[in-house]
Amino acid sequence: MKIKKTIEKVPGGLMVVPLMFGALLNTIDQAHLPFIEAILKALGQSAGEDGHYSFLYIGGFSEALFKTGALTLIALFLFCAGSQMDLRVGGKALKKGAIITTAKYLTGLSVGLLFSVFFDPMSGLLGLSTMAIVAAMTNSNGGMYAALTGEYGNRSDVGAVAILSLNDGPFFTMLALGMMGTSFPFIAFLSVLLPIGLGMLLGNLDEDIKSFLAPGETLTIPFFAFALGAGMNFMNFFNPEVVGAGLVLGLMTTILTGFAGIAALKLFREKSQIGGVAEASTAGNAAATPAAIAAAAGVAASTGSMTAAKAQQFQDIASLATAQVSISTLTTAVLCPIFVILWDKHQKKKGIDGSLPDEQLTKSHQSYQVNQEANA
């Protein structure tokens, strides 16, 4: 059976499919079907506080892995992802990566800030929250970027992914929320950043450790995705606040961050802007950010730097935001490659072949301009 290959055919499948499956099982569980409850009772399970029996709350290893282990699994993912963030990158790739990352982040931050001014930052237009907007728009699909730049870009475009990987995880989202007036103490940042930082340190100090931890960057994704899904009700995915908001998030991410990347690369006189367009997506693992933010809010509340009521607001919207970001992932997985293909055609009409090395790219464009002037 080709289960894995089938899942991978779905955009962001390793994240989205387990998340959906977890949500489906939780929906069935929360329906409290009599025959299921009868079986659980016969097996000796104790009833919950509401008097019902739930198979996702069976206890032991099963409950710890499939229902309550999301945060632990996300922490492990962040540790492994951090270990793959290579700080040794070529000058041109470093430049492009810094330009694109900054443009994408400032765009997501600006949209989130404007949204919080005109709408309720916790549940505004279409049920969107500022947290969901920033999480979706500032975090990109590194695998898709590498694939698209590998085909339509050059080596420095591909190499820029080492810098772009810094937007993995919830740090940029927390930073943005802090700029918008949400008070996260340093300990809350540390509680989220420590796994990433330790992973990055070890991965850059020892290539063997980096290789050892590499599988964990993808291996953990379906497990924490399922656990996140097990906290959702599948009916939420048919809620306009999920589907409509997720589609809007996806459109904003592709269009706004894509053109921001183009403008930024043009500003710094880069002939090809393929990298800026290829970055205009939402990462599947961005769906883990709302849960991480909710956990950080809990830490902030425990230190007294955030009220318990405010922290509870983040925790209450985490599931909805996770679903919205997941829809954005699917949307951008379709729109981003189309945008790259269209922009590549647009560039080639101007004599710019983004797949050429940077030196040849400049000479090719200069030759095109000379020919155009001669023909004129």
Image: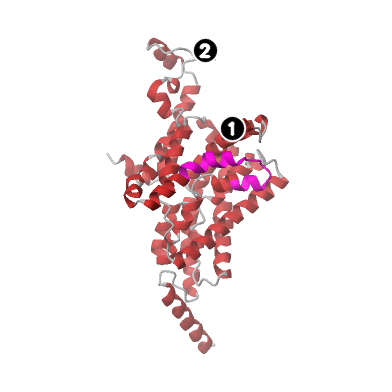
Say what amino acid the circle numbered 1 marks: Gly
Residue marked by disc 1 = 298
Q: Is residue 342 above or below residue 316?
A: below
Residue 235, horizontal then vertical, whole percent: 53, 31
Q: How is the image coloured?
A: secondary structure
Pick whichever, 203 or 117, lies toward us. Answer: 203
Could you give the CA–CA distance between mark 2 and mark 1, rounded to whole angstroms? Answer: 28 Å
Q: Which residues are magenta?
A: 175-196
Give percent across and percent down for residue 104: 56, 56
Residue 304 in view, yes or no: yes
Membership of 110 in magenta stretch = no
Dot 1: few (<14), some (14–19), or many (≥20) neighbours within 10 Å? many
Sequence-wise first label, 2 or 1:
2
In the rendered image, the vertical position of residue 209 relative to residue 322, given as above or below: below
> Where does label 2 land, which residue?
51
> In this figure, what is the number of numbered marks?
2
- Amino acid under label 2? Gly
At x 59% / y 32%, what residue is drawn? 298
Q: Quadrant of residue 269?
A: bottom right
Q: Let me know if residue 322 appears in the view.
A: no
Image spot of residue 39 (x, y percent) = 39, 14
